[in-house]
Image (tube, helix red, strand yellow):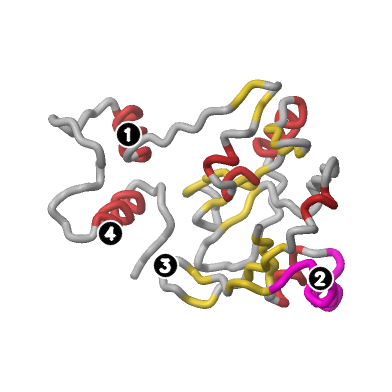
Amino acid sequence: MLLGIPHSKGYWSRRSRVGYKVATAFREALVAKGWVTWAEQATINLHEGSGNCNGYLVADFVPSKADNVALQTTDLIYAVSTSAQESKLISNNEDSRMRFLWDFWRQYPLTYGSIKIFTASRKFNNLQLTKGGRIYGAWTTMKPEERLKCTIDGKPVAEVDVSGMNLTLLASISGEIPFSTRFKDAYACDWEDRDQVKAIINETIGAGTIEQN
């Protein structure tokens, strides 16, 4: 089990009530006591640059200490944020739509073991909070096999991954069906790099991450 711990002073100054010094002292204490060991330097996928959230391997004896403990705070979770290039700051926007979802999810939480998940953050691509808007929750980074162990109201969840999701949705919304043949991958064509095709199409329709390079 890997635990992600940010190293950035700016992160702890913005997102934490305890501050960078306390967060650093706490991280160093975890390492000193053998609860975690540094394992992985985070990288930024697009350019393989240096990341912020380092990975620490959690000792085998630690998870059992969390049995029957389910703590989730909304104080440090932003309802809405932006990854806009013009600003690296996170917007603490009291978005009424996300807050409504949080209240609804509290009544019908996604449950994993004894943990109840009822919050998520909506991330936009621009400062106006009109592009993107994808929702990220605790389930986002869970392994698929673990995610399928979750329940809602005691009922198991399912996961559906639609090929070419954004193109499929765009075709449904517009009523235009641009393809005359069946295919397994909507982004597969004669272009050498399939991922480039996907990035360009998604950015063109405002559904992807801004990748100007």
Depth check: give the residue in front, 159 or 59: 59
Whichever of labels 3 and 2 marks the residue nearer the N terminus, that label is 2
Q: Which residue is mark 1?
A: 168
**Residue at which label 3 appears:** 46
Q: Which mark is residue 30?
A: 2
Question: Where residue 137 appears, x then y in whole percent?
Answer: 63, 45
Quarter of the image containing the C terminus? bottom left
Q: Nearer the viewer, residue 29 or 207?
A: 29
The segment highlighted magenta reads 17-37
* Label 4 with label 1: CB-CB less than 8 Å: no
Mark 1 crowdedness (10 Å alpha carbons): few <14, some 14-19, many ≥20: some
Q: Residue flagged by tag 1: what amino acid is it?
A: Thr
Question: Does 167 lie within the magenta span?
Answer: no
81 lies above or below 139? below
Label 4 vs 3, first from the N-terminus: 3
Q: Nearer the viewer, mark 1 or mark 2?
A: 2
Tell whether position 33 is magenta.
yes
- Residue linked to disc 4: 196
Front of the two marks 1 and 3: 3
Residue 203 is situated, as x and y percent measured from the top left of the image, at 35, 53
Q: CA distance from mark 4 to mark 3?
A: 11 Å
Q: Residues within 10 Å of mark 2 (few under 14, many from 20)?
A: some
Q: Please tell me whether mark 2 or mark 4 is closer to you in this view.
A: 2
- Residue at disc 1, secondary structure: helix
The amino acid type, in three-letter code, at marker 4 is: Gln
Q: Quadrant of residue 68?
A: top right
Label 3: state its secondary structure.
loop
Amino acid type of the residue that numbered disc 3 sits on in the rendered structure: Leu
Which residue sits at x=77%, y=71%?
A: 13
Chain-order first, disc 1 or disc 3? 3
Q: Secondary structure at mark 4?
A: helix
